[in-house]
Image: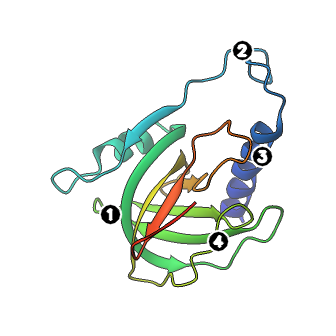
């Protein structure tokens, strides 16, 4: 239940910022936080950047990486539809991937044990984190994300 609430909160925040007027400031009148971008590519078997993001409870961080699908979950059909699956990185850290299938094509052939690469926005949670925004932004205000699976890019 807590996990579902965290996912819903992250998706609600993403939707709010996606559809909020572009005034150049955040909703509370402060300058918007710069989009941070880090790579989760493994270096010597270590996902050091992700571990740092996790340890520092960072969110709103553009990340790229790869991992192995360990569980394919049912779609989240509440609001924007999301294909959900959990991947394990080389470090052992797990991430929930929420891939918006209202804006990007579903990965129909995705199975447990498959390797995927991704580029999206990381949000911290106690279980390892969430990666979303793995799709294009029709309004062009957010970096376009993607998922690569079996030689094909989904965005």
Residue situated in front as seen by the camera: 20 or 154: 154
Indicate which label's residue lies in the foreground, 2 or 1.
2
Location of residue 85 with respect to 99 vertically, above or below: below
Q: Mark 4 to mark 2: distance in Å?
A: 33 Å
Q: Mark 3 to mark 4: distance in Å?
A: 16 Å
Q: Which residue is mark 2?
A: 30
Q: Earlier in the sequence, mark 3 or mark 2?
A: 3
Answer left or right for 41 relative to 69.
left
Q: Earlier in the sequence, mark 1 or mark 3?
A: 3
Proximity of marks 4 and 2: CB atoms separated by less than 8 Å: no
Location of residue 31 with respect to 13 vertically, above or below: above
Q: Mark 1 to mark 3: distance in Å?
A: 30 Å
Answer left or right for 73 relative to 43.
right
For the point 61% across and 56% down, which residue is it? 135
Indicate which label's residue lies in the foreground, 1 or 3.
3
Q: Earlier in the sequence, mark 4 or mark 2?
A: 2
Q: Earlier in the sequence, mark 2 or mark 1?
A: 2
Q: Which residue is mark 3?
A: 15
Location of residue 63 in the rendering, given as x and y in whole percent from the top left corner: 45, 46
Instruction: Check residue 83 in the rendering and tell me which mark sits there, or answer none.
Output: 4
Location of residue 99 in the rendering, given as x and y in whole percent from the top left corner: 62, 63
Location of residue 127 with respect to 152 vertically, above or below: above
Residue situated in front as seen by the camera: 52 or 22: 22
For the point 58% across and 82% down, which residue is it? 108
Quadrant of the image containing the N terminus: bottom right
Q: Which residue is mark 1?
A: 92
Quadrant of the rendered image containing residue 13: top right
Q: Secondary structure at mark 3?
A: helix
Q: Secondary structure at mark 2?
A: loop
> How many residues crowd mark 3 within 10 Å: few (<14), some (14–19), many (20+)?
few
Q: Mark 3 to mark 2: distance in Å?
A: 19 Å
Proximity of marks 1 and 3: CB atoms separated by less than 8 Å: no
């Amino acid at each position: 239940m807590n996990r579902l609430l965290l996912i819903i909160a992250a998706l609600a925040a993403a939707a709010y910022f996606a559809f909020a007027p572009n005034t150049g400031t955040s909703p509370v009148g402060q300058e918007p936080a710069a989009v941070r971008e880090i790579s989760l590519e493994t270096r010597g078997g270590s996902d050091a950047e992700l571990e740092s993001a996790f340890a520092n409870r960072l969110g709103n961080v553009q990340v790229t990486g790869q991992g192995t699908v360990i569980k394919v979950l049912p779609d989240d059909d509440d609001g924007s539809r999301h294909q959900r699956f959990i991947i394990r990185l080389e470090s052992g850290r797990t991430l929930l991937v929420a891939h918006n299938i209202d804006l990007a094509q579903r990965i129909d052939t995705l199975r447990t044990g498959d390797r995927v690469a991704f580029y999206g926005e990381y949000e911290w949670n106690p279980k390892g984190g969430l990666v979303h925004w793995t799709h294009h932004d029709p309004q062009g205000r957010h970096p376009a994300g993607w998922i690569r699976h079996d030689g094909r890019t989904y965005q």
